[in-house]
Amino acid sequence: MKLQFFFKIFLALFFSFSAYANENIDNKVKKLTLELRCMTCQNQSVHDSDSDYSKDIKKFVKEKFQEGLNEKEIKIILTKRYGEYILFKPYFNLKNLFLWLFPFILVILSMIIFINHSKKTKLE
Amino acid sequence: MVPFIVLTTICLFFLIFILLEKNPNDPPSALLNKNLPTFSSISLYNNEETLLSDSLKGNFTLINFFASWCTPCRAEHHLFFKIKKEIPELYILGFSHKDDLNDSKKYLEEEGNPYSFVGIDRDGKIAFDFGVFGLPETFIINKDGEIIYKHTGPLTKKIIEDEIAILF
């Protein structure tokens, strides 16, 4: 009787842990695939797309998370094959420095021009 | 006035940079000028015949991913006979990608078989390693085993003349 009770508790715990782990992995898959570009669609993430390509990538990402790889490692594998184009948000590295900093440079330049222009107008 | 012109020029330059880099019809290939991925593939016609990626070294190789269910593949298929005739030293390797094997055989019976070897890529793993995302896709590998050309979509006579023939 006691053994049966402990067995039931063990089963309940086992299934709740496995359900939690699956949910956790599904959340991780969702988070990562939302950051990946569907290469065969226009402006859609892998998560939002139902194309064959996206299904394969979702399956691959899930398998890799189950194998214990982290988000960064999976991104590296994918960019080695598909290039950084697969990432909606490119890496912050020397190659992409211009891409990342340009909006800020543009804002600063615009502000300088705007201030100078305002000063000139005031003086006049 | 001058600062506005400078600002506009910078913005235009940036816009052109983005548009050139992010053309959705021709995404940049990550594998260009890199070694071809390692693979092993069984022949479509003989279960005991296997092709290893290492065996491709020493020859120029054209690799084409196709499937019987892929309509654009049929459109380009006859052009591989033209390539074979014009560049006889080229080893033409076809991969039956995520296709039923009998359907692939039937497709090659109907359209003809221009390939020196037809490998099976049933689960799409080889295509994944090549960064394939849509059929058909064609790669050219040099004698050192490096990918020197990639084309996504069906080949045309113009592409063969302007982009492929000049590689030899």
Image: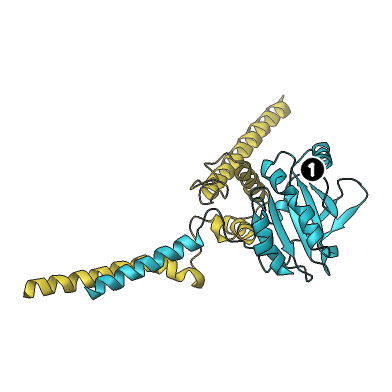
Question: Could you tell me residue A104's position as x and y percent?
Answer: 34, 67
Instruction: Look at the image and tell me whether residue B143 can be seen.
Output: yes
Secondary structure at numbered mark 1: helix
Please, which residue is most extreme toward the right here?
B48
Type of amino acid under label 1 = Glu
Q: Residue at x 79, y 61 (%)?
A: B86
Q: Residue at x 91, y 52 (%)?
A: B49
Q: Residues within 10 Å of mark 1 (few under 14, many from 20)?
A: few
Instruction: Work out whether B162 lies above or below B46.
Output: below
Chain of the residue under the numbered disc 1 shown in the image: B
Q: Residue at x 60, y 42 (%)?
A: A21
Question: Could you tell me residue A45's position as x and y percent?
Answer: 51, 47
Instruction: Look at the image and tell me whether residue A105 can be seen.
Output: no
Q: Residue at x 12, y 74 (%)?
A: A120
Please, which residue is most extreme toward the top here?
A1
Occupied quadrant, residue B74: top right
* Shade of chain B as shown in the rendered figure: cyan
What residue did someone put label 1 on?
B111
Q: Nearer the viewer, residue A105 or B45?
A: B45
Please, which residue is most extreme toward the left here?
A124
Q: Is residue A19 left or right of residue A124?
A: right
Question: Could you tell me residue A101's position as x and y percent?
Answer: 39, 69
Q: Nearer the viewer, residue A70 or B161?
A: B161
Q: Is residue A106 left or right of residue B29?
A: left
**Chain letter tied to yellow:** A
Q: Is residue B123 left or right of residue A57?
A: right
Question: Could you tell me residue B31's position as x and y percent?
Answer: 66, 63
